Image (tube, helix red, strand yellow):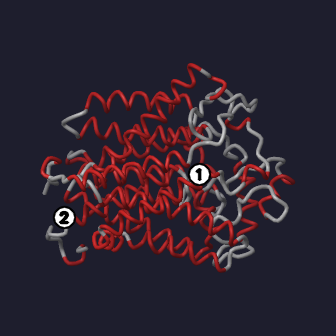
Amino acid sequence: MNPLPRNQYTRTTTDLVMGGCALLLIWLIFIVNRPPTLQGFSATIDASTYVTGDWLNRTLKNTMLLLGGFLILQRVYLAGLILQINSALGLLVGYALASTLWSIAPDQTLLRLISLAAILMACLSASMVAWHPRRFQDVLLLPFIVIIFGSLILGIVAPQYAIEAHSEFALKNSWYGLTHGKNELGMISGTCVLIFLHSVFTRKKRRLLAAFLCLGAFTTLILSRSNSSLFALVFSLTCAFILLTRSSHLIWIRRNLISVAVSLIALYEATILNFIPGLGFLLSPITYLTGKDSTFSARTTIWSIIEEHIKLSPLIGSGYGAYWIGPVPDSPSRIFLTKMYFYPTEAHNGYLEIVNDLGILGFSFFVFFIFRYFQQAQLLMRIDRSQGALFIALLLQQLVANLSESDWLSRSNTFAILVLASLCMARGLVENRSLRLPAKESL
């Protein structure tokens, strides 16, 4: 069963206005997440960097909360259906909210939850109004163009504001453009390549535009020198190709792809964190492909310090966003200045970050969210094969990227994109609730 063509979704003046407001909310996510300076890792990180935020950011977040709340109230029944299908995400965020009760820095937990709530409301609004099956790609088009081509132009016109001047080999001459750092630019570029390349092969219109945008995104990905982002893209593209191809030789792989892919990622995660001693040889392919040594650019030292902190509260964690509050005297993360003589700002492993913040119990909610996401994507593939494959590839990309970066349940652009994908996927299922499925797979 194919989704309705875009021109069959009628539009009233009210729909157009509400659609424009929802589009604005998505753009505001990227504006709020803009870097405070264009100095990359050369910028000095101190306690003053971690202030609550300037008046502009607070105003933008309040706007997102108010406007998003207004749009949701206009279609509260539809919002309820989308959230019902996506209940796993709600449980995860709800647990993060509950962690305020035992957080080691409850004020910081609340502040970060407000920012996360603004992102969630913006994404929910975008999935509710002006809907059509490719709504996800369309609302991200302008932010992607600004970041990708803005970074390229800035790197050519004023390279001192777009290219890393840091003396460390892993950073030197890497591009960060209009983002916080090279890995963020690499991840956004990789996501752009995935989405635009998907459009080239599955859309009948805008193929030339999509190919041009894909070329620009691939250029910034290479210039960022983010090998981990490149590896995540190759992995997710390979999986997307297997899901979309109809070759009879790949039937078994197609049926078991998600299980095999997630198992490989879990095995590598257990290996790099040394949960399974003696399997270090498994790191050889990933260290070769990502261009890192066996210490993953000293990330293992960061991981060992985080693991020690997890032992203080392994079951429930130390509270969402309560650990990385800056190199201030009352923060346990200040220990990095003593042990490593710099402040990494994150655990550089999204899975460790979840356990550190929310404990083993919170991690179980996270696993449930991943499981439900894949389950819903497989349902969507029965309705819209190409879109379901895209959503699966996006999650696989994030699963790989979080082996060395911390994006899960963050306020970053990349996690916001995944939340938008999850909610648009739920909306696609709402639109096709009448599709008859076996009882065990019903919505």
Residue 114 appears in which quarter of the rendering?
A: bottom right
Is mark 2 in CB contact (under 8 Å) with mark 1? no
Inter-mark Cα distance, 2 to 1: 38 Å
In front: 201, or 177? Answer: 177
Residue 95 in the image: above or below residue 207? below
The secondary structure type at the circle numbered 1 is helix
Q: Nearer the viewer, mark 2 or mark 1?
A: 1
Quadrant of the drawing holding the N terminus: bottom left
Residue pictured at 34% horizontal, 37% vertical: 196
Which residue type carries mark 2? Asn
Label 2 Cα crowd, 10 Å radius (few <14 / some 14-19 / many 20+): some
Q: Position of residue 399 (x, y in %)?
A: 49, 55
The numbered mark at residue 57 is 1
Q: Kindly indicate the quadrant of the structure image that contains residue 321.
A: bottom right
In the rendering, at what x and y percent does residue 223 appear?
55, 28
Q: Is residue 267 visible?
A: no
Q: Position of residue 309 (x, y in %)?
A: 75, 67
Query: Which residue occupies 40% across, 37% down?
Result: 193
Q: Which percent across, then down, holds residue 128?
A: 30, 61
Q: Is residue 188 left or right of residue 284?
A: left
Rendered image quadrant of residue 173: top right
Which residue position holds label 2?
A: 432
Of labels 2 and 1, earlier in sequence is 1
Residue at (65% x, 80% y) in the render: 101
What's the amino acid at mark 1? Asn
Count all numbered tags in the image, as a single digit: 2
